[in-house]
Image: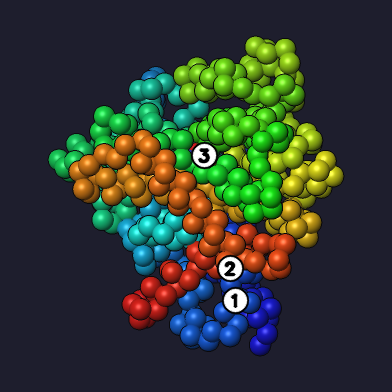
Amino acid sequence: MSWQEKLDHYMTGLEKRNPGEPEFRQAVYEVAASIFPFIEDKPIYHEAQIMERMAEPDRIITFRVCWEDDQGNIRVNRGWRVQNNNAIGPYKGGLRFHPTVTQSILKFLAFEQTFKNSLTGLPMGGGKGGSNFNPKGKSDNEVMRFCQSFMTELDHYIGADMDVPAGDIGVGAREIGYLFGQHKRLTKEFTGVLTGKGMEFGGSLIRVEATGYGAVYMMASMLECNGESLEGKTVCISGSGNVATYATEKINQLGGKVVTLSDSSGFIHDPEGIDAEKLAFVVDLKTVKRGRISAYADEYTSASFYAGERPWSIACDLAIPCATQNEINEKDAQNLLKNGCIGISEGSNMPTEQAAVDLFQQAKILFAPSKAANAGGVAVSGLEMSQNSARIAWKEDELQLMLKDIMQKIHDQCAEYGRESDTHVNYLKGANIGGFIKVADAMLAFGVL
Ligand code: NDP
């Protein structure tokens, strides 16, 4: 069988075993399409069924989460933890609270996380979890009661050397505080069982900035390899949460101009650029006032708000999607290319649909996939785990250097495995192969598990 036939056979089996899970299928295909040609002349990985084993989570835990709202009504949500693979370290990956959360989405995220964590070079396996709970519009007390109930169940399955969750969409500093408090109360122990913690209780400096900063460092490294820099570049960013705001901050610091931000209600376009003062307005709007991005256009007359649309029709040199999965479709990719976009760094997880990825690949623009581009967050989470275990706290400048160094090494691994000619690196292929090798070789060492 050729590698293409093996890939087709593999995907047919995967779809049969995982019906109705399109996001999971998409994520596995994106990796498998790079790995099957790479292992064509390496039979040991085929004989050991490594790809089959990697796409079968170690376990998936689901549980009921009951809580009481402020009116005294009983509410019921579903919670999950997908423990995908712990070949190279404890399961590690965020928790997502959003009404669109399904098992398929968490399986795709846990699968991706396994490769991403491997790329960081730190000892972390892959996992992901969350709930279909919607924190939007809930009072702090409702969020607290939900988090306490969620942790009461999750607590059976996590531990500092077993599984270390973190934040993701809908799980920020407030939620991590409530979750950690409940864990501490249940176990009577103070260990680094969650990352993204507050600085008062074991958090790490630069964790909040790390994902957005890292996605920009990745872009800067790709540009540098092509004799370019961020200086003077116009950048479209989506989202207005943690990743989007810190990506904007770093672009500003490195001399670029960010002209868009968005949320699930639409996007704003500010041709004059979103400078530090305007960004502070966005952070206050989204994290303190918990408002909508349209308020930006009410505040700044230079900006327009486009309801229900995504920012990819706006002309830019570079795009950094930072909202959610599948937020760039084929038409968006055509628009970006037509308007002269030369680079994409995926801040959010799997933001680009397969047809759009194909277009970027054919156009040979700089394309950093999320498992490489947004690995800065989990890398600093890994450093938070190290600090907690050693009961130390590194200084900000030390951590900044470590983050930059890890992102550069991720870039270099992608370049090593993805170089296709003197002038072109396929970063997608490079990230997949770079992430695969370490996990696969560890699995081989353990025998049949
Ligand atoms: P936040 O919850 O802080 O922000 C998410 C942003 O995306 C909000 O602006 C939100 O808008 C928007 N959004 C969410 N869902 C949708 C949707 N269906 N359509 C349009 N917009 C949407 O999350 P983060 O910034 O932490 O995460 C963003 C992405 O980055 C996710 O894919 C996450 O998995 C990924 N990521 C995050 C890391 C981190 O360290 N935080 C690490 C690695 C990856 P609204 O306010 O309307 O909900």
State the count of labels.
Answer: 3
Which is more N-terminal, label 2 or label 1? 1
Note whether ligand 1 is within 8 Å of mark 2: no
Q: Position of residue 416 (x, y in %)?
A: 57, 66
Q: Identify the residue at horizontal 50%, vertical 64% (top origin).
A: 435
For label 2, the crowd category at 10 Å Cα-Cα, with few meaning under 14, some 14 to 19 and many 20 or more, is some
Q: Is residue 405 left or right of residue 19?
A: left
Which residue occupies the foreground of this view, 139 or 276? 276
The amino acid marked with disc number 1 is: Phe
Q: Could you tell me how far apart the alpha carbons at marks 3 and 2 are, in whole angstroms? A: 24 Å
- Judged from the image, the secondary structure of the residue bearing numbered disc 3 is helix
Q: Quadrant of ligand 1?
A: top right
Mark sitting on residue 417: 2
Residue 71 appearing in the image: yes
Task: Choose the circle earlier in sequence order: 3 or 2.
Answer: 3
Q: Given the current orientation, which residue lies at the most extreme front position?
A: 227
Q: Residue at x 63, y 16 (%)?
A: 295
For disc 1, the neighbor class at 10 Å (few under 14, some 14 to 19, many from 20) is some
Circle 1 is placed at which residue position?
38
Q: Give SS at disc 1.
A: helix
Out of 22 and 5, give the one closest to the viewer.
5
Please, is residue 181 above or below residue 43 in the view?
above
User: What's the CA distance linking mark 1 and mark 2?
Assistant: 10 Å
Badge 2 amino acid: Tyr
Residue 384 left/right relative to 221: left
Q: Is residue 103 visible?
A: no
The residue lying at 35 percent from left, 78 percent from top is 445
Question: In the image, is 214 to the left or to the right of 390?
Answer: right
Q: Secondary structure at mark 2?
A: helix
* Eye-nearest disc, 1 or 2: 2
Quickly name the residue at label 3: 213
